[in-house]
Image: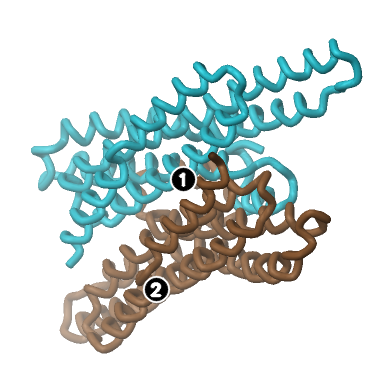
Chain colours: A brown, B cyan
Amino acid sequence: MAADETVAGFLDGLASEQPTPGGGGAAAISGAMGAALVSMVCNLTIGKKKYAEVEAEMTEARARSEALRRQLTGMIAEDVAAFTAVMAAYGLPKGSDAEKEARRAAIQGALREATDVPLACARACRAVIDLCEGVARQGNLNVISDAGVAVLSAQAGLRSAALNVLVNARAMEDRAFAQERLAELDRLLAGADALTERVYDVVRAKLT
Amino acid sequence: MAADETVAGFLDGLASEQPTPGGGGAAAISGAMGAALVSMVCNLTIGKKKYAEVEAEMTEARARSEALRRQLTGMIAEDVAAFTAVMAAYGLPKGSDAEKEARRAAIQGALREATDVPLACARACRAVIDLCEGVARQGNLNVISDAGVAVLSAQAGLRSAALNVLVNARAMEDRAFAQERLAELDRLLAGADALTERVYDVVRAKLT
């Protein structure tokens, strides 16, 4: 499963009893939809006479949102790979002491990656949220509701990715590694909900 | 564009300056991902000895989440069709008085559908949120983070769909029709954020 699957096929896989794709892939898609909608608002603002004053900001925002969209789209497959590696490590033989030790090391190695992939997703989603305020304030009024959908999608992506960081970090023996990731996660979450509500309010005020 | 497009293709379309797909399609996908993840948690709970006590509830929840997933997946294309009809109506000739009147009527007719599609999306997303609490409390602990992602995705879908209802309802001349839709929307939004936070807290508590 990756971004070249159909939307319906991805949803079938998500609903199935197969362990992948799961919440991590959904988080990446939420973030990527947020980034894509930021790009859409920028695309429909750039080149319009009425919005000539904000053209530079919109062009800058679009460059960032498109880079974030590429990253987040790639994370759909990265999440599957990281989760599959964890499952494979848990499936290793544990007969002898040497096997047990090899299995333990493999699990811990796989958990690092399975923590870092959703952390990178959270980081990218937070960056999308940060882009939304300017776009909601300055973007083309005809598509301003899309700036609102952008921030809501990115927020869902951030908070969803956070759950996946928590799940994997708690199983790690290297507590220093885990604590460092959890500390970054706290920084990414800090203020994100308040900012989302501020952007949502900006959009709602323009719609009424 | 519909659910048979690839994920990457949908995201490209979302980011482009083409008016469809837009935030309405993103809302439907968010809701469908939420429904799919409810189904996933149910699928990984049903048939497990440890969870035999909640098997009936999980089977019931899965039947509902799968029906909601089908509805929400179909709404991706319905949103495109409704939006396209509105654009086409605005594009009708407005030379003579008769043309102006025909155009006005066509716009108003298209706006009804363009209000009812996101309202139906909001209704389905709220139903997904309502399903999540039981699933988060009773579902298989190994995939409980997916119940958290489910509620966050459905919440983003609900609030995103709400923006699209507002956009179209405000342009409607039939104020009674518009007010009725806005009143239902208020009922769907009421308590949804508080319920989402409650489910999120249930999940987080199980992860720490």
Q: Nearer the viewer, residue A186 or B59?
A: A186
Real-space Cα distance between discs 2 and 1? Answer: 22 Å
Establish if B119 lies above or below A27. above
Q: Residues within 10 Å of mark 2 (few under 14, many from 20)?
A: many
- Residue at disc 1, secondary structure: helix
Establish if A33 lies above or below A96. above
- Amino acid residing under circle 2: Leu
- Residue at disc 2, secondary structure: helix
Q: Nearer the viewer, residue B145 or B88?
A: B88
Task: Tell me where residue B172 appears, x and y as whole percent.
Answer: 60, 24
Residue A97 shown left or right of residue A26 in the figure: left
Residue B198 shown left or right of residue B100 in the figure: left
Residue ID at (31%, 40%) = B129
Residue ID at (49%, 38%) = B161
Residue ID at (50%, 59%) = A31
The residue carrying mark 2 is A188
Residue A110 seen in this snapshot: no
Q: Nearer the viewer, residue A78 or A194?
A: A194
The quadrant the C terminus of chain B occupies is bottom left
Task: Tell me where residue A153 appears, x and y as whole percent.
Answer: 48, 53
Give the quarter of the image for residue A170.
bottom left
Task: Tell me where residue A55 appears, x and y as whole percent.
Answer: 76, 65
Residue B172 shown left or right of residue A195 in the figure: right
**Please, which chain is the residue tagged with disc 1 on?**
B
The residue carrying mark 1 is B30
- Nearer the observer, disc 2 or disc 1? 2
